[in-house]
Image: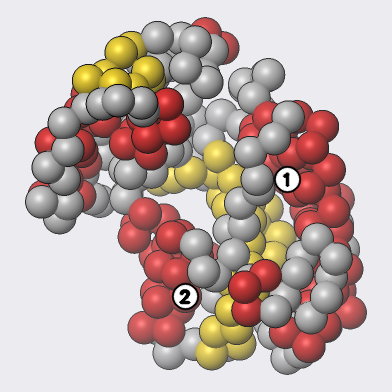
Amino acid sequence: MRIAVAGATGNIGALTVAALERGGHDVVRVSRSLGVDLSTGDGLDDALAGVEAVVDVTNGPAAGPAEAVAYFGTATRNLLAAEERAGVRHHVLLSIAAVDRVEGNAHYAGKREQERLVAVGPVPWTIVRATQFHDFAAMVASWTEQDGVAAIAPLLVQPIAPADVADILGEIAVGEPQGRYADIAGPDPQDLVDMARRTNEARGRVVKLVPTWSAGFGLAMAGNVLLPGEGARIAPTTFDEWLAEQR
């Protein structure tokens, strides 16, 4: 199949491209750095010529809720319109587990708008909600790190390996549209603070972590909120296995 990956130069995008190419598919990379701009639509029609399926793993800039909704809304409308013109048969969207259970987070607001537009859009679709990735904890800590100290929220998550996410997206993209897919998650719940500590240690970094709910994620995300929903698809790679690759 000829399959386009929107957000192809990002971490998940690059892994998804690799997974599809291992399966023998012809992959079109869609990214602003490659001359295709979802915000304006520039280059989309040429990029999607002959494409049968699109996997959207794009991310948005850090901003407030209104800005995030506007960004994801514009990009998704442009992408879906171009897909309709090209005769694309399947739109696969990577979203976030619990995206509809968390208010007050700008990124989640943007992703909800993205899901809404896909669900009412002109292209048959599958929405795949994933839990946080294994590298999420250290990334979150890096946002606040200063002079070797980082604030981080004590979230309970059930993280999934980025490579497992890419493999699942590739598998779904070559099949028929399924609508709302089961949540995908890793095997075990983890504490975000402990994940960040262990990831930094594996990478040879010394960072003092300060658990706090004022570090970008509020109490709306406390407890079991971010865990996958009932009937989730559990990916195979554990956090420990992923961590061993970081050393």
Q: Which of 95 and 14 is in front in this view?
A: 14
Looking at the image, tell me whether mark 2 or mark 1 is earlier in sequence order. 2
47 or 2: nearer the eye? 47
Give the label on residue 17, or none. Answer: 2
Find the distance from the CA under tag 2 to the CA under tag 1.
22 Å
User: Looking at the picture, does residue 99 appear above or below residue 71?
Assistant: above
Q: Position of residue 105 (x, y in %)?
A: 64, 25
**Percent from the top left, x then y, of residue 151?**
37, 18
Q: In which quarter of the image is the N terminus?
A: bottom right
Residue 165, image quadrant: bottom left
Q: Which residue is drawn at 25% across and 51% down?
A: 236
Relative image position of residue 99 (x, y in whole percent):
61, 32
Question: Badge 1 is on which residue?
Answer: 115
Report the side of 142 relative to 77 (left or right).
Answer: left
The amino acid type, in three-letter code, at marker 1 is Glu
Question: What is the basis of the colouring in this image?
Answer: secondary structure
Q: What residue do we see at 60% from left, 83% from top?
A: 28
Q: In which quarter of the image is residue 42?
A: bottom right
- Up-down relation of residue 2 to residue 29 (above or below): below
Disc 2 to disc 1: CB gap under 8 Å: no
